[in-house]
Amino acid sequence: MTKLMSVTRRTFLKTSVAGAAGAALAPNAFFSTAMAQAALTVGFIYVGPKDDYGYNQAHAEGAAALKSMAGVTVVEEENVPETVDVQKTMESMINLDGATLVFPTSFGYFDPHMLAMAEKYPDVQFRHCGGLWQEGKNPMNTGSYFGYIGQGQYLNGITAGYASKSKKIGFVAAKPIPQVVQNINSFLLGARSVDPTITCQVIFTGEWSLAVKEAEATNALIDQGADVITCHVDSPKVVVETAAGRGAFVCGYHANQSPLAPEKYLTGAEWAWGNVYTDFVTKAQAGEKLGNFVRGGLKDGFVKMSPLGPAVSAEARTKFEATQADMMKGGFSVFRNGLKDNKGAVVVTADLAEDAIELESMGYLVEGVIGSTS
Amino acid sequence: MTLEINSQSLVPPPVRAGDFRPAIEWAARRAEPLAIALFAVLVGLAIFSVFIAVLGKSPLQLFQLMYAGGFGSWFSIQNALSRAAPLLLTALCVALPARLGLTVIGAEGAVVLGGVAAAAIALPIFGLVPPLLLWIAMGIAAMVIGGIWIGLSGFLRHYRGVNETIASLLLAYIAIALMNQLIEGPLRDPASLNKPSTTPLSAEYMLGKIPGMDVHWGFAVGVVACIISYIVIEWTTSGFAARIAGGNMRAAQIQGLPVGRLIVGFTFLAGAFAGLAGMIEVAAVQGSANGSLAAGYGYTGILVAFLARHNPLAIIPVAILLGGIDASGGLIQRRMALPDATVLVLQGTLFIAVLFSETLYGRFKIFNPDLWKQPETSKGAA
């Protein structure tokens, strides 16, 4: 390693020393722990409560999957804000618990917090949920992972399309950002694959977690005739309970919410982080290099669907299962050539597979979505 | 809470030959708030221990972890100081109006808008001026906007009779909505796709760390602000006038004190400090203004100010104590499998204990030299 460093140009070193050191040291560190059969300590940080029936619970369930692995110690901290607090939490896990692999799971933990810690602790591996990592720009001891959960929202849409009698479905959304917008569009397109006259009304609450507004939005959607509701907020609990309480069907998101509304729950788009985390940790224990840019969909086991609820018809089940089987082959296009936005402009000029990069900067709502991003 | 007017000096009176009495009396008076606060904290910890024991966990292990996580090592101390930094300034936003008898709880709004103002003023001049000038401009912008925001509550209170507690709280919600509007609209960096933010400052424009420590400059700024506030409140005529107005608003008006100007002035100053906390979040931690500015510092500041009994100097140790408790909260979660809310329960218990301890003031003879005279004399005097 010293030799490598001495022959490398100083300017190059300046920008990549952290990454190089991380890449070179990490396998060493893992090798020694594997030799000693000692614990690999893995840290998980959540922005909200671990039992929120949503985003954080999905990650906590993934972390729980590691607890049965030999030699793995999981340390977790919930309700950590995206401030200097999360930096100190990472440092505390590294310094006081000996964590060598850290998963800060909230989107806002990446820049500047995780990047600052990655520079300070080059022999610790950091993997962030959200897909922000860029080669050449971010250190090599960091990385990101994300899943194509829009596929799940498309499948949600299929069950919604069959269940809806009013031909109006509703979406409670947090913020008009690409990840959310893609889910809204996918949900409607799934429903329209059943009946092209279906429309989807969207209400943005403006915050990731704002129970009162989420309940208001759900009620407003139902008042306007929507009879199937889904959402993209951190904790879908309020939306699911409110909608089911009003007699509407619901499709879940992030985690399985069927216990909250067993009769009205059609299905849900869930994360399968247990697979992703198990893969990372197995590699780390074997001393292999961890991926820096990891993503996948249904096919790769990053995303899964909740079991279909009792209200799903046989017809809906057939179409759902056929589409899911298509998606499992890979390359299924939700966004097809000629697709228009809800202002009438053509926004898609080629069939886009789930991994198309254009999908990640989506700013439009497709034709049939009632609402506006601004 | 502390509405009494005292002119106790930080410096003991000079000791004349053979007469230690003034010095002893001075020490007794100064010891009262310390002893009562300490007692209240101990009672709070005792109640909390019962709570932990009921959950089937060891209070002893918990306190050991709290010490280890908050103060047990140089890393832990720096962790506590980093977390205390914003609390110093937001606590001042509560403590200063409190000396005038006002309960302002909307510091969060000033933090958020201060941060946005700092980021907004940085956008056009960023890169054109040296870092120091940029920080000064950001600081001024943040303080002015934060000051206006909290000053507005004071203004409404004095001139329109609107309750300042409710007004400041509601203004905080408006501030957060305004921030969201601005960072998702006109001030948004187009590159911030999934987390709307302003364009980030580059590394050389970031407020760095205090030399030799892993704590950003915000902590030093907060300590200086507390000392300045103490001087203003205790040693200046406007501070004296403010304390009189806080003791009895009507009496102050009859005395001809400019009560309206005092209220608006002190609420402005209070908001300016909270705004500065927002600027520091942008310049020292986040690098840009975004939704993470609304992290609850304004609300924790209320707790700090009340625990410090609105004494700006006492805010410093109290903020560090709460920073330490916060820092150890993670360790408690990780090692004892207790939920995050444990630390909130502790904070709440301490808060209630300190509020109840207010009734103890003046009850102990040892702290009140006026009661030291012979019983018969005091009876006679009474």
Image (tube, rainbow, N blue to C red):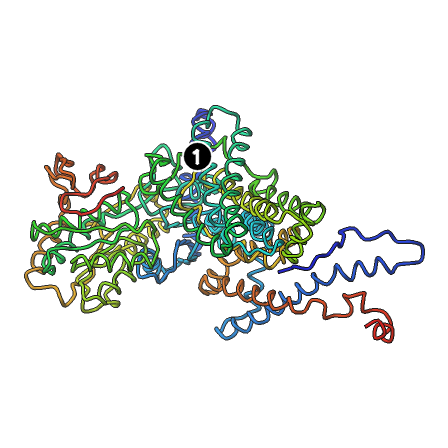
**At numbered mark 1, what does the secondary structure look like: helix, strand or loop?**
helix
Q: Quadrant of residue A343?
A: top left
* Image quarter of the C terminus of chain A: top left
* Residue nearer the viewer, A87 or B231: B231
Residue farthest left in this picture: A315
* Image quarter of the N terminus of chain A: top left
Residue drawn 61% across the image and 65% down it: B354
Q: Position of residue B203 (x, y in %)?
A: 47, 32
Please determine whether, in this image, residue A259 is positioned above or below residue A1: below
Residue drawn 32% across the image and 55% down it: A234
Q: Position of residue A205 (x, y in %)?
A: 30, 51
Amino acid type at image mark 1: Ala
Q: Residues within 10 Å of mark 1 (few under 14, many from 20)?
A: many
Residue drawn 16% across the image and 58% down it: A225
Q: Chain of mark 1?
A: B
* Residue nearer the viewer, B269 or B313: B269
Please determine whether, in this image, residue A222 is positioned above or below residue A141: below
Left or right for A127, reference B153? left
* Residue nearer the viewer, B1 or A172: B1
Residue picked out by circle 1: B120
